[in-house]
């Protein structure tokens, strides 16, 4: 294996030297191998889509050479830009001997600009016959040998620029990611939400149960935390009278990495004064459907070979969905011993300090989530696992909260926000006790947030959506790393 790798390195070095020699050949002709601005008139897809009006007309396009097929005094090549690939045609008798010799110095991977006439070949392929061209950037490294589909995920994630060059479907994924975020903004702006920005570095890690990243601010001489949620600052704005706010931003959690989790990810959180979780649930259903339709033109999608209908979302309480999936009815459980027996029967781990409903939540987390394939709102969460949610009016052991699950994954979380400062403070105290029991993801006490609530916060409905997971869903991507341009990776060992 080592011998083969050494040979590959040697081959690449030789190819790179050939390209450097060609770069020097351009320089010797007083041609800059790394050019300057080029005024294009069309992208590749424009030409393909509008052949009827562009036939026999001149266009100026620019892009990367992805293929070259030479036939003596005439050669075909393929140019790729952000929109598509298009065939171009170089003829010696059209561009002249000197320019054709310069064309011979080009390699796959070079970026060029060209002017030419649009026509169709006898095979019916839309093509641009080149009249003149300039080199915009000489590629000094060869593209991967099987460049029509770079498959090695390690290389794809570490060298995303290479992934984008050689895999058109990857470019489409990230273009759609941008469209999804734009659609979310349009939807919220149309509902009079105000987009805001809150601090990324926080004196206290709050708004979620998660392990934070810790940094140190030298000038203030204090430890700070990269935010694990935007929630508590956004609710301070509700206190301040900004009745509808949202933030799309980066979140940081110092936790495990898998196909659904990355140390930093993007979320959108919204807060609406004088609303409750039912209104937020309605808005979430509308948002998911509208964004999907805006980007894909339909609300019925296929994700990993499973058809999903995003136009209608089922609603069911946690007690009922646990009973549905496991046959265990926690509403009939009266002692912790009974709950523990159920957990042990189902082989679900729990902590000794967990009560009945906390154990039910563990059962839900371990056994039920993965069964929720079609879009489902699970409502009425135990108060013990929802420290920022308003208690249910009829049963204070539960809170008015929902989570949206699609394909067995949590996509959104929303609730009627707790606006009672006395209750909120006690919830933080309870969380502190959990930290003392070894739960380093439990909430810290946030006295300033309590102070804000003491000034009065209107009843509020809040929502959080994981944008990366939504992009995964709408682009049929199996891993979160497929929808984050530069996912975090372990340092590559030195060989």
Image (tube, rainbow, N blue to C red):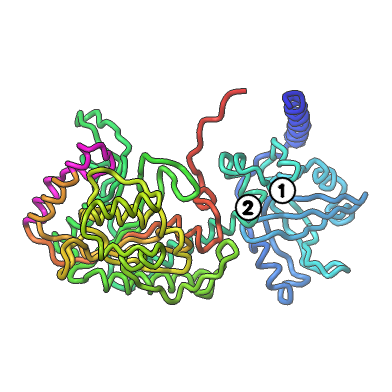
With 189 as the anchor, is 263 left or right in this view?
A: right
Residue at image coords 31%, 70%: 281
Q: Which residues are magenta?
A: 432-454
- Of residues 379 and 416, the one drawn nearer to the viewer in this rendering: 379
Q: CA distance from mark 2 to mark 1?
A: 9 Å
In x, y percent, where is residue 351? 28, 43
Vertical comparison of 430 with 16: above or below: below
> How far across and how far down the image is residue 447, in percent?
11, 45
Tag 1, which secondary structure? strand
Residue 233 vs residue 50: left or right?
Answer: left
The residue carrying pointer 1 sits among few (fewer than 14), some (14 to 19) or many (20 or more) residues within 10 Å by Cα, namely many
Vertical order, 158 against 239 (above or below): above
| Contact flag, marks 2 and 1 (Cβ < 8 Å) | yes
Q: Residues within 10 Å of mark 2 (few under 14, many from 20)?
A: some
Query: Which of the 4 image quarters holds residue 194?
Result: bottom left
Give the residue at x 55% y 56%: 477
- For the question of whether residue 245 can be seen, the reply is no
Instruction: Name the residue located 21 percent from the left edge and 62 percent from the top edge.
Output: 398
Foreground residue among 484 and 369: 369
In the figure, residue 361 lies in which quadrant? bottom left
Query: Which disc number belongs to residue 38?
Result: 2
């Amino acid at each position: 294996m080592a011998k083969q790798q050494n040979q590959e390195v040697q081959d690449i070095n030789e190819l790179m030297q050939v390209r450097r020699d060609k770069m020097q050949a351009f320089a010797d002709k007083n041609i800059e191998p790394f050019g300057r601005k080029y005024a294009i008139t069309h992208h590749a897809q424009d030409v393909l889509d509008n052949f009827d009006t562009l036939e026999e007309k001149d266009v100026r396009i620019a892009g990367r050479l992805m293929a070259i097929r030479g036939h003596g005094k005439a050669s075909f090549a393929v140019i790729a830009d952000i929109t598509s690939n298009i065939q171009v045609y170089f003829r010696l008798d059209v561009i002249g001997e000197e320019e054709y010799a310069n064309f011979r110095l080009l390699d796959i991977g070079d970026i060029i600009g060209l002017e030419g006439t649009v026509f169709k070949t006898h095979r019916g392929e839309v093509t641009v016959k080149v009249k003149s061209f300039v080199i915009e950037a000489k590629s000094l490294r060869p593209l991967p040998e099987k460049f029509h589909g770079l498959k090695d995920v390690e290389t794809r994630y570490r060298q995303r620029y290479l992934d984008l060059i050689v895999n058109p479907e990857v470019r489409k994924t990230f273009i759609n990611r941008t469209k999804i975020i734009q659609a979310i903004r349009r939807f919220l702006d149309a509902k009079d939400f105000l987009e805001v920005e809150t601090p990324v570095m926080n004196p206290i890690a709050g708004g979620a149960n998660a392990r934070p990243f810790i940094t140190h601010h030298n000038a203030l001489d204090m430890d700070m935390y990269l935010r694990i949620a935007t929630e508590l600052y956004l609710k301070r704005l509700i206190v301040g009278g900004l009745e509808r706010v949202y933030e799309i931003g980066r979140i940081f959690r110092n936790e495990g990495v898998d196909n659904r989790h990355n140390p930093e990810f993007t979320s959108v959180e919204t807060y609406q004064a004088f609303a409750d979780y039912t209104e937020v649930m309605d808005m979430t259903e509308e948002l998911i459907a509208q964004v999907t339709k805006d980007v894909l033109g339909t609300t019925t999608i296929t994700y990993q070979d499973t058809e999903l209908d995003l136009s209608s979302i089922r609603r069911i309480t946690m007690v009922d969905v646990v009973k549905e999936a496991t046959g265990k009815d926690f509403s009939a459980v009266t002692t912790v011993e009974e709950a523990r027996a159920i957990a042990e029967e189902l082989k679900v781990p729990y902590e000794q300090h967990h009560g009945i409903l906390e154990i039910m939540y563990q059962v839900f987390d371990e056994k039920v989530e993965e069964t929720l394939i079609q879009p489902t709102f699970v409502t009425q969460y135990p108060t013990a696992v929802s420290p920022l949610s308003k208690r249910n009016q009829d049963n204070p052991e539960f809170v008015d909260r929902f989570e949206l699950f699609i394909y067995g994954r949590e996509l959104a979380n929303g609730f009627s926000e707790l606006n009672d400062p006395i209750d909120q403070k006690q919830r933080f105290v309870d969380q502190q006790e959990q930290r003392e029991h070894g739960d380093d993801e439990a909430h810290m006490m946030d006295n300033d947030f309590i102070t804000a609530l003491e000034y009065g916060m209107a009843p509020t409905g809040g929502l959080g959506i994981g944008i990366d997971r939504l992009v995964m869903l709408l682009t049929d991507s199996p891993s979160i790393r497929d929808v984050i341009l530069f996912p975090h990776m372990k340092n590559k060992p030195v060989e």
